Image (tube, rainbow, N blue to C red):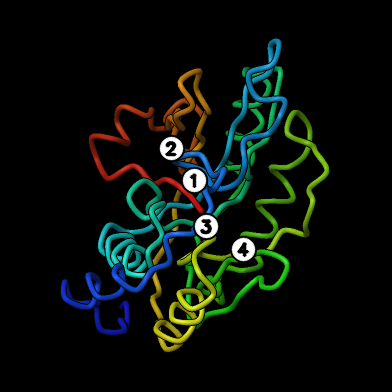
């Protein structure tokens, strides 16, 4: 059962927006999956993929409203999520999708609890909600996924989290960290989404992979989109 901090009112959101500095620099985060697009994306035969855990619609909507209230424009295009694989180039789509399906097949559904806030400052201007229950499962999934056709060196150690403010003013980051320090929600996770960065620079859900499922019964992007809001990421 989610335990919410009180949702910001329209007046609070508008007052917060009026307080924002106009000097905010543009991010390089692509819609859908967090993180800069890798330089190998779209070069030659290379494509880029990302893998995330989406959230229940009510949890995602609440956190999206909070993120918008802190002046983060990515709130409009990135629903709340936990990234398992950030932007990663691959040259073999068939090997990649087979690899991701196999990891999903071996993973049992699990419970996630997100609670309290943290920050990657001063290394990165990010405030996030911590992952408590399910932290180890996320790390294990990441380690399994980031092998084979998706193996790459990452600039930072993997740390499961839910971004709620990114690259906004220091005052807004402080506000985000304080406003959601008592936030908590618990929910089951039974699938993960495989996304591709298409030629138009948009992240497209290619397949929603059920944990413990047979590859022949995986949900396609069309079925996933018809059944629930497509998650996006950072």
* Residue 57, quarter of picture: bottom left
From the viewer's perspective, is residue 174 above or below residue 215?
below
Task: Determine whether label 2 and label 3 are within 8 Å by CB.
Answer: no
Q: CA distance from mark 4 to mark 3?
A: 6 Å
Task: Determine whether label 2 and label 4 are within 8 Å by CB.
Answer: no
Q: CA distance from mark 1 to mark 4?
A: 14 Å
Q: CA distance from mark 2 to mark 4?
A: 19 Å
- Earlier along the polypeptide chain: callout 2 or callout 3? 3
Residue 161 horizontal/vertical position (percent): 57, 65
Task: Determine whether label 2 and label 1 are within 8 Å by CB.
Answer: yes
Element class at badge 2 = strand
Element class at badge 3 = strand
Could you tell me how many numbered marks the image carries? Answer: 4
- Earlier along the polypeptide chain: callout 2 or callout 4? 4
Which disc number belongs to residue 192? 1
Residue under the image location 49 percent in, 26 percent down: 201
Depth check, mark 1 against mark 3: the one in front is: 3
- Earlier along the polypeptide chain: callout 2 or callout 1? 1
Which residue position is annotated with label 3? 82
71 on left or right of 225: right
Task: Determine whether label 4 and label 3 are within 8 Å by CB.
Answer: yes
Which residue position is annotated with label 2? 208
- Earlier along the polypeptide chain: callout 1 or callout 3? 3
Q: Nearer the viewer, residue 22 or 205?
A: 22
Residue under the image location 16 percent in, 71 percent down: 10
Depth check, mark 2 against mark 4: the one in front is: 4
Q: Nearer the viewer, residue 108 or 111?
A: 111
Query: Outermost residue toward the right?
Result: 153
From the viewer's perspective, is residue 220 above or below residue 45?
below
Which disc number belongs to residue 160? 4
């Amino acid at each position: 059962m989610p335990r919410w901090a009180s949702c910001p009112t329209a007046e609070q959101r508008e007052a917060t927006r009026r307080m924002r500095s106009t000097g905010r620099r543009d991010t390089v985060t692509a819609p859908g999956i967090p993180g800069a697009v890798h330089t190998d994306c779209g070069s030659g035969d290379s494509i880029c993929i990302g893998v995330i855990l989406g959230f229940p619609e009510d949890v995602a909507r609440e956190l999206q409203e909070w993120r918008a209230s802190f002046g983060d424009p990515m709130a409009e295009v990135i629903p709340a999520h936990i990234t398992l694989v950030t932007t990663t180039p691959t040259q073999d789509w068939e090997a990649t999708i087979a690899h991701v399906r196999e990891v999903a097949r071996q993973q049992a559904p699990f419970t996630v609890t997100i609670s309290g806030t943290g920050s990657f400052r001063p290394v990165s201007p990010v405030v996030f909600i911590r992952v408590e229950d399910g932290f180890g499962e996320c790390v294990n999934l990441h380690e399994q996924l980031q092998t084979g056709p998706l193996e790459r060196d990452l600039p930072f150690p993997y740390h499961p989290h839910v971004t709620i403010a990114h690259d906004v003013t220091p005052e807004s980051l402080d506000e985000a960290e304080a406003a959601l320090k008592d936030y908590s929600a618990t929910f089951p996770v039974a699938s993960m989404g495989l996304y591709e960065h298409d030629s138009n620079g948009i992240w497209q859900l290619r397949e929603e992979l059920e944990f413990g499922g047979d590859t022949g019964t995986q949900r396609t992007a069309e079925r996933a989109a018809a059944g629930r809001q497509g998650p996006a990421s950072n």
